[in-house]
Amino acid sequence: MSSTDSSSTAATYLRPGEDAGDAVFREKLREDRMRETGRAVIRWVWEDLDHPAALVRRLRRALDRA
């Protein structure tokens, strides 16, 4: 399972009354639920696409662990 992050992700998904820290914490809980399914989870950011070979290596390692 792959999840993309960006510096604006937390701010984009703010709920009323939340700050960025609340949104980040909520996202970490979501990631925990994904991991509990037994799937490999890898987080990447758009800048990782500047180095596609390195990203592919990371994705392959994650799939090998799954």
Image (tube, rainbow, N blue to C red):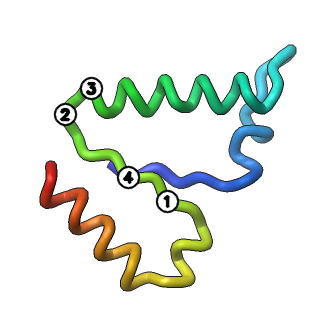
Query: Which residue is found at the position 56% from the left and 31% from the top?
Result: 27
Residue 9 versus residue 15 in the image, above or below: below
- Give the structural element (helix, strand or loop) at label 1: strand
Could you say where residue 16 lies in the image, as x and y percent from the top left?
84, 17
Residue 43 versus residue 26 in the image, above or below: below
Query: Which residue is found at the position 53% from the left and 72% from the top?
Result: 48
Closer to the N terminus: mark 1 or mark 3? Answer: 3
- Give the structural element (helix, strand or loop) at label 3: helix
Q: CA distance from mark 2 to mark 1?
A: 19 Å
Q: How many marks?
A: 4
Q: Amino acid at mark 3?
A: Glu
- Judge from the rendering whether residue 57 lies leftward or rightward of residue 13; answer left or right: left
Residue 18 versus residue 60 in the image, above or below: above
The mark found on residue 60 in the picture is none
The mark found on residue 38 in the picture is 2
Q: Amino acid at mark 1?
A: Trp
- Give the structural element (helix, strand or loop) at label 2: loop
Q: Which residue is mark 3?
A: 36
Closer to the N terminus: mark 2 or mark 1? Answer: 2
Q: Amino acid at mark 2?
A: Gly
The mark found on residue 42 in the picture is 4
Could you say where residue 46 lies in the image, as x and y percent from the top left?
60, 67
- Asked whether the beta carbons under mark 3 and mark 2 sit within 8 Å of each other, the answer is yes
Could you say where residue 52 lies in the image, as x and y percent from the top left?
43, 82
- Give the structural element (helix, strand or loop) at label 4: strand
Q: Which residue is mark 1?
A: 44
Q: CA distance from mark 2 to mark 4?
A: 13 Å
